[in-house]
Every structure is written in structure tokens, then in C-alpha cells.
Amino acid sequence: MDSLGQYTTPKQVLIKSKSLGVLYYFLVLLISFYIVGFLLYKENGYQKSVPAEGVLAIKVKGTAATNETETGEKRVYDANDLVQYSSDGVFVATRLVKTMQAKGTCLGVSKDEVCSKGKNTCVKGSYSRNGRQTGKCLPSTSDPNSAHFCEIKGWCPPEAEEDDDVLPLENVGNFTVFIRMNVKFPGMYNENGEEMRWDNANGTEPRMGWNLFSLENITQTDDKNFTEISTYGSDQMLNVYFDCNLDEGVKVPKPQSVLNGDNETLATVAIEEGGVQTCSPEIPFVIDRVDNPLAELSSGYNTRWISAVNHFTTPNAKLTNMTNMFPLNPPYNCRFDTKNPETRLLTKAYGPRLRIQFSGVGRRFDVVMLTQTIGAGIALLGIAVVITDAFAKYIPGFKKQSYDVWKFEEHVDEEGDLLKSYFGGDSKFNSQQQQQQQQQPAQQQKISYRHSSSSSSSKSQQQHPSIPGYGATTTTITTLPATAAQPLEEKAPKKTGGLFRSRSLLRKS
């Protein structure tokens, strides 16, 4: 509760110390450099920033070829065969693993479909990775001692566990990737009152390195080349980032072709350079790997799709469907449904998966932001005072014992305390004085007038014999009637040592 009756106010003390002065102004200079160099220049503290909003579109074109395993012939693919689009990016196949399949019964190939010759662990009606088990345990080849697998009913033959028949694609690295960008800056308007926008259309002509890129250049990183990416695939995040200074726009006269009717003439036109026109993303794009290329589980990227095929076009083909579908290596213990034939081509594709992420800001001069930055910088200057005070109090070589005396003082306010007066503090003081006066005789009060000391009385009397008693020590007792005493409330003499004293009116002539 005592702290409620106290008030602390700063006191300005001028200390003439070279060491403290150099320290203080060094800190002021350092903070000033921080305000001007970092807050205003580096961080653009004088500009208002708004998040950029944009739409990105991507398109892939190109042709590639591969050698077919079964026929040995070159098969040509285009982007429509190898590219899959999604809402956040695109996938381009660089290697293919194909499996021709038909509905029927065959042997499984996965670990949960392995069985032993002496002990049948296959359960009829149970489901495994590749289909529904029939309950039979059969050898995988004509050799009865070969590995045994459970027979399943489903798409046959199943996709192989190991990618033995991989078809690498040629020329896929030269596929072109066109990225179209359209960006706007909400709340930023040009001189015509239109919201500022930017795009990379470049008229109608794509330009390499600006809005057109090769698949090899846009996907390879510092630690992974395109050969490794095309072999195992990759899952990558393509970061398109904008940082646009919209204050730099100026109009410059330039010669331009102007169409006047049917005639095209060369005229000087004011073209705006800088500002929103100089806005562009950071190129090359920053690429982050979503997958872990060093991980043993699920590193790289692959996906699957199916294509419809029909090998049962004639009655004779139904009887020889295995030969038609697998002319070089027909699967063992595989039987197809010839009554209701269904076929498909399962393709497992490896390649780069590009996810596109957009972000950015637009900046422009703003008086409010400039004022806030300068105000915050001025407030930081108070740190120089705090650090200098700490050095003067605690750091050896700067510390002075008298610093606390200069810096801190304590005073008691008796006369100007409004709360004390309001709650009767002065009345209590006056009542105490009245009690002291009542203890004296009611008829008289003694007042003493003392002039000079007795040691010089004889000498003063000899110098001034005409003035009786000059220089002598005299004490005059004056008796005042009680009714003549003035009330304390009207005129209270100064209290000193418990007696009311007045100086003698006599002076030395």
C-alpha cells in the first residue's frame, strides 16, 4: 500500500564524462544506421505491402519414343499419352512399365500370396494384394520344385514386383513447359483508378526462360540431374514468388509502330517502364523436393493408369488369346475367361511430378507506414539511454559511486499534497498546535528578543556611550492578554525548535 502513495518521475542529469558520452552517441549512431539502413532501405519500411493474388496455368507439349519389348519396334508417344494434369500441377512420364492383363485366374506374385508345397496356406475366398484366392497352391513354373504361390482370380497376370521390363523414353527431356501467369495486387491502383495487374504473356510469342521452359531445365536441381530424376521420378514443389516494387514506374518516350488506318508509321510514344511493368517472378524458380530421394521407402515418384485394349476380336482368337496377348512369354498357370473376355493395359510410369505454388507481395509508398517506421525507430533510441545508465551503474571503469546520488533523489511533499488536504491532514496539524498553546498560561505568552552575544557587550557600550544598553544582552518579557493573540488559522508564525521566535527590529547604526 505504501507504493500507492509514491510517484516516480525522470530527472535529467548532465554528467560531464567523456567515456559515457562516447558510449551514448555511439549507440545513437548505431541505432540510426539500423533505422535508415535496415528498416527503411532493406525492409522497405516506407512502403505498404499487399499479398499478390494470381492464377497460374501450365501446358506441356512434345513427342517421345521407346523400344517395345515384345516387338522391338519404335513406338512414338506425344504429350497426350504421357502427361497427366491436376489442379495443382502436372506429371510427365519418363519411363514406362507395361502389363497386358485380362480377367481370369493366375498365380499371385506378392509376399502375402506365397505358399509352401507341403503345406497349403491359401484360403479360398480370402483377398490378397492381386485378387481373390481360389484355395489352390501351385508352382510358378513347370518345375514342381519351383516357388509356389496361391492361385487368385482377378486381372491376370499381376503386375510384377520388380520392374524388369522398363521402357525408357527418348527425347522426353526436351518437352516444353509453358507457364502462364496472371497476377493482381488488391488495393493498388494506377493513375486511371484501375487495379494493378501483370501477366507474362509477352504479347503472343512464347520466350524460352521467361514463360517457356524445357522439362529438363525446370526439374533438375543442384544435387539431382535429369537422368536420375527420369529414372526414379521425383515429387517437386515449384515455388513462383513475386516481390514487386510498384513505385518505380516512369514514362519514357520510345519509338513505336502506330497503325493509322491502313498505314503503319513509326511514332514516339510514352511507354511506362518500371512499376508494375517491371514486376516479374524470381527466375530460376525455387524447387523443393517433396519426396526424400535418400529414403528407402517410397522415394521418387510413380503413378499408374490403364488403357482399354481388345485382343478377342474373332472366335479363333478366344482360343489362342494367350498367344495373341503374350506372343513371346506367356504366363504359366494362367487361364482367361473366354466367354466374357475383358482386357486392359496397365501402365506404371516414373517421372517428375511438378506441384506449383504461388506467393508474392506488391509494395508501394505509404505515408502511414513511413510515419510508423520512423516512430518505432525513435522509440528505439531510448535503448541508448538504458544501456548507458547500465554501464554507469554496473560496469567497472564506468561505474561511479556518486552516480546514484546524481540520478536518484527522494522528497516528501507536505505542502502540495491535495489528498492530505482533502482528507483533513492540515486540520490535524493545526489542532496539535492549539493543544500546545492551551498548555501555557492562559493570561500571557512569553516572547524573547535576543540581540547580540555578551562577549561583545562591553566593547559596544564604550563605542556608543550615548545609547544606553547598546550591545548588551537584554531579555524583554512582554505580557500579552490572551484576547490579543491572533488565531492560528489567520497567521501562524514559523515553528522552529518548539518556540515562536521573531528577529529583533533593532539594528546596528
Image (cartoon, rainbow, N blue to C red):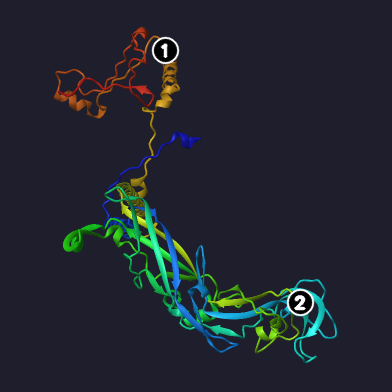
Quadrant (top left/top right/bottom left/bottom right) for the C terminus: top left
Q: Position of residue 361 (x, y in %)?
A: 38, 57
Q: Position of residue 167 (x, y in %)?
A: 56, 84
Q: Residue furthest right?
A: 118
Tell me, for residue 305, which label it has, or none. none
| Quadrant of res 137 | bottom right
Can you see residue 94? yes
Residue topped by disc 1? 441
| Quadrant of res 397 | bottom left
Can you see residue 45? no
Q: Position of residue 10 (x, y in %)?
A: 35, 42
| Quadrant of res 279 | bottom left
- Name the residue located 43 percent from the left edge and 26 percent from the top edge: 419
Q: Nearer the viewer, residue 479 or 403?
A: 403
Q: Is residue 13 left or right of residue 91?
A: left
- Residue type at mark 1? Pro
Q: Are marks 1 and 2 in contact (CB under 8 Å)?
A: no
Q: Is 423 above or below relative to 167?
A: above
Residue topped by disc 2? 152
Q: Is residue 286 left or right of residue 486?
A: right
Q: CA distance from mark 1 to mark 2?
A: 131 Å
Q: Nearer the viewer, residue 298 or 337?
A: 337
Mark found first going from the N terminus, 1 or 2: 2
* Element assignment for label 2: strand
Q: Nearer the viewer, residue 176 or 43?
A: 176
Q: Is residue 464 left or right of residue 108?
A: left
Q: Is residue 70 left or right of residue 34?
A: right
Q: Position of residue 318 (x, y in %)?
A: 71, 81
